Amino acid sequence: MDSQNVSYNAGQAKGQAQEKASTMMDKASNAAQSAQDSMQEAGQQMKAKAQGTADAVKNATGMNN
């Protein structure tokens, strides 16, 4: 193998490693965004349940009139 071939193969390997790293970073970013979305939705659901509970207590105690 001459030095030109070695350099070419090294460049190919570097390019493939960079592409794999980029793909892994994209997957990690997508997973993080998905987790953030899930947490935000869970927070909204908890807020709605708490509001419903507060309204039920107000209705039960006559404070809603």
Image (cartoon, rainbow, N blue to C red):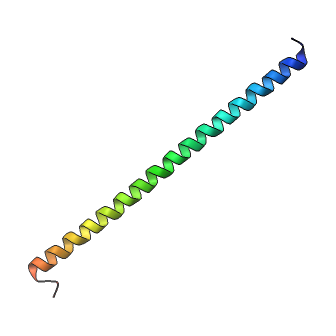
Q: Position of residue 57 (x, y in %)?
A: 14, 74
Q: Residue reaching furthest top? A: 1
Q: Compared with residue 10, is residue 49 higher up or lower down, i.e. above or below?
A: below
Quadrant of the image containing the N terminus: top right
Question: Image check: 64 left or right of 40?
Answer: left
> Residue 54 falls in which quadrant of the image?
bottom left
Q: Residue reaching furthest bottom? A: 65
Question: Image check: 26 left or right of 1?
Answer: left
Residue at the image point whose x is 86% and y is 18% from the top: 5
Q: Compared with residue 46, is residue 2 higher up or lower down, i.e. above or below?
A: above
Q: Position of residue 48 (x, y in %)?
A: 29, 68
Residue at the image point whose x is 90% and y is 13% from the top: 2
Q: Position of residue 55 (x, y in %)?
A: 20, 76
Q: Compared with residue 7, is residue 25 higher up or lower down, i.e. above or below?
A: below
Question: Image check: 23 left or right of 12?
Answer: left
> Residue 52 falls in which quadrant of the image?
bottom left
